[in-house]
């Protein structure tokens, strides 16, 4: 199963991707986690990315593409993968098509997690209190939501236009939401 999980910040993509990874036995590729690992390791890439992430903006397409290509080359990806946090704009969606065509591993499904904006702000505030992520401050959250609406919402339309998109209600118990996602996946 090769799956893209789309949804605004705070929609629960990361949480659901972690569960699906276990239940489906496939790789979880979170571009946010990959970037945070670079920041934590103090690499040149991490240094470049940190300020951009803290402000709630998108790290360059070029950096993301290099990072993703390297990750897709790792052996665990052969079992399938859940992509969480990529693509975040239409240029990235086209780049992903190219990468996957090159390795002959096209997507099986794209699932959008729908959650109302008021609830997103509430959830992120809760996470900020728990985890203290540098980009979970109110100003950065506002910016991330705006970037989502301007740049990532068109990605939803991009996949909807192709007929590969399933929309799932992201509000409810974790098990319930996961059940909705798995029910939306094509049967093998
Ligand atoms: P959230 O979904 O809560 O915004 P993520 O962990 O997915 O959190 O992403 C955190 C930050 O990492 C983003 O705000 C952005 O700065 C950067 N990032 C992650 N994925 C991408 C991407 N595909 N393109 C550009 N920047 C990205």
Image (spheres, rainbow, N blue to C red):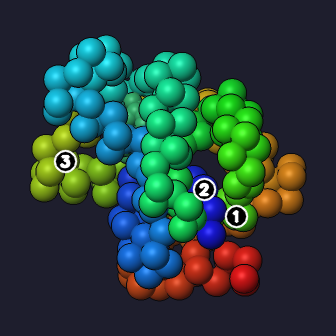
Position of 174 relative to 26 (above/below): below
In percent of the image, x 13 and y 44: which residue is there? 132
Q: Nearer the viewer, residue 171 or 159?
A: 159
The reply to whether the C-beta atoms of the residues labelled 1 and 2 are less than 8 Å apart is yes
Q: Earlier in the sequence, mark 1 or mark 3?
A: 1
> Circle 3 — which element?
helix
> Which residue bears the numbered disc 1?
109
In percent of the image, x 32 and y 19: which residue is there? 45
> Which residue bears the numbered disc 3?
128
Q: Nearer the viewer, residue 187 or 7?
A: 187
The reply to whether the C-beta atoms of the residues labelled 3 and 2 are less than 8 Å apart is no
Report whether 82 appears left or right of 124.
right
> Which residue bears the numbered disc 2?
4
Tell which tag, 3 or 2, sits nearer the viewer: 2
Between the C-alphas of marks 1 and 3, the distance is 31 Å
In the picture as drawn, the residue positioned furthest to the right comes out as: 162
In percent of the image, x 27 and y 15: which residue is there? 44
The reply to whether the C-beta atoms of the residues labelled 1 and 3 are less than 8 Å apart is no
Position of 171 relative to 29 (above/below): below
> Circle 2 — which element?
strand
Between the C-alphas of marks 1 and 2, the distance is 6 Å
Report whether 187 appears left or right of 174.
right
């Amino acid at each position: 199963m090769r799956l893209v999980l789309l949804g605004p910040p705070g929609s629960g993509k990361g949480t659901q991707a972690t569960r699906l990874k276990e239940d489906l036995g496939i790789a979880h590729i979170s571009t946010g986690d990959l970037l945070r690992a670079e920041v934590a390791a103090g690499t040149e890439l991490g240094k470049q990315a940190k300020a951009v992430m803290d402000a709630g903006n998108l790290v360059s397409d070029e950096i993301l593409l290099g990072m993703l290509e390297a990750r897709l080359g790792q052996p665990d990806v052969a079992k399938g993968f859940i992509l969480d946090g990529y693509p975040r704009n239409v240029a990235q969606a086209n780049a992903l098509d190219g990468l996957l065509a090159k390795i002959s591993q096209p997507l099986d499904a794209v699932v959008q997690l729908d959650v109302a904006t008021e609830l997103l702000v509430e959830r992120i505030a809760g996470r900020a209190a728990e985890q203290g992520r540098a980009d979970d401050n109110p100003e950065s959250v506002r910016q991330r939501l705006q970037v989502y609406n301007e740049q990532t919402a068109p990605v939803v339309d991009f996949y909807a236009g192709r007929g590969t998109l399933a929309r799932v209600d992201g509000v409810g118990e974790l098990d319930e939401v996961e059940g909705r996602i798995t029910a939306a996946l094509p049967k093998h």
